[in-house]
Amino acid sequence: MFEALPVKQPDAILKLMLAFRADTRDHKMDLGVGIYKDINGATPVMQAVKSAEGKLLEEQDTKAYVGPLGSPQFNEAMIETVFGKNADKQRLRSAQSPGGSGALRIIADFINEARPDATVWVSDPTWPNHIPLLSAAGLNLENYPYYDATHCKVTIDAMLSSLQKAKPGDAVLLHGCCHNPTGADLTHDQWMQVIQLLKDKDLMPFVDIAYQGFGDGLEEDAWAIREMAKQLPEMMVAASCSKNLGLYRERAGAALLMGRNDTEATTALSNLQTVIRANYSMPPDHGAHVVEMVLADDEFNANWREELESMRVRMIQLRSSFADAMRKRTNSDKFDFLIEQKGMFSRLPLNGEQIEALRENNAIYIVGDGRINVAGLPDDQAAMDTLTDAIAAVL
Ligand code: LMR
């Protein structure tokens, strides 16, 4: 069987992650894969997570299966985190999943069961793994234009006119906040226009929220989802705890479904459960258990929110110091867009050759489309100067 297989390459982000690890140069700078880094360039376990893990280790007395949907307490806490304390819980259901990607995949399988002729509309550009992940579930995909790389902003008119072509029952994949890879989010007014279109055309929102708390704040970043919950009959959300709880390798996330009413939500969840059972049977426990404990305990929760907020503020400061340094270095405001954009990513206006030259000559790792991880930017002035000099040189 194996002899006929072609060799396959990892995608751009994974490839860069591996190349960075293999690079032996001391001064190498990682602006690639989306993991948060502190001032020392480390990705430490968050304090509240550490405390909860200690408690879990002491208290846990079984490793028996959790069941396909995971822990009811975790699911309830995720509904509140994403939809807010005042959410209409009668219409909401959640399934614990192996990370945000696991949630995306089970929702994709669920769409394929519920409406196999549906097209899923995906922003151009989007997280590169969205495409193979959704295609692997057998879904038809179409792009809608999202980003104007020349002016570094959302192309709202082109997005809306493209989505006019969607047929009733199609799903639209939307980034809840901190768009990956562009960092360009819809304004509240633009969200209202998108929501109106979803309503008018009977389209299903499928929201990926992987960076809640990294943009404008934990509650603020869920604004669009909560607005959709007020205005629309149904919705599906893939939420990740990888970034905002720093649980990357533990794979904790949730697939959330909002139905028209209690009965329809229960039926939808029963279908999701069947998809899960046929897929990985039951989700892993550890990461989600820790999330549940952090969210439930007042002290852990307050500590987590504080640390998350300091991470968010640090990324805003890094955006601003990088834009300042580029303004001085290039004598132009060409990089000021970085200040307006949100979350962990933005795209630099660099071509493939320039990106390769930065990697070859300066050990600076940037994803092939120009995406940088803002949290990987250096804090100290000397390293910032090295970076801006290197970018100015390739420009
Ligand atoms: C990223 O976009 O860098 C992260 O979501 C990590 C990944 O799996 O690609």
Image (cartoon, rainbow, N blue to C red):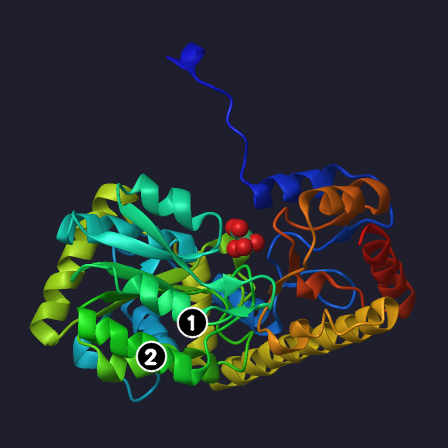
Residue closest to the eye, 107 or 166:
166
Q: Are marks 1 and 2 in contact (CB under 8 Å)?
A: yes
Is residue 327 shown to the viewer in this render?
yes
The N terminus lies in quadrant: top left
* Dot 1 amino acid type: Ile
The C terminus lies in quadrant: bottom right
Question: Is residue 354 toward the left or the right of residue 119 in the image?
Answer: right
What is the number of the mark on residue 193?
2
Which residue is denoted by mark 1 in the rendering?
156
Query: Residues under labels 1 and 2: Cα distance?
Result: 9 Å
- Lower position in the chain sequence, tag 1 or tag 2: 1
Residue 6: where, in percent of width, then height?
A: 47, 19
Residue closest to the eye, 78 or 367:
367
Q: Residue at x 82, y 39 (%)?
A: 24
Residue 266: where, in percent of width, then height?
A: 12, 67
Quarter of image, res 81: bottom left
Question: Is residue 377 toward the left or the right of residue 330 in the image?
Answer: left
Q: Is mark 2 within 8 Å of ligand 1?
A: no
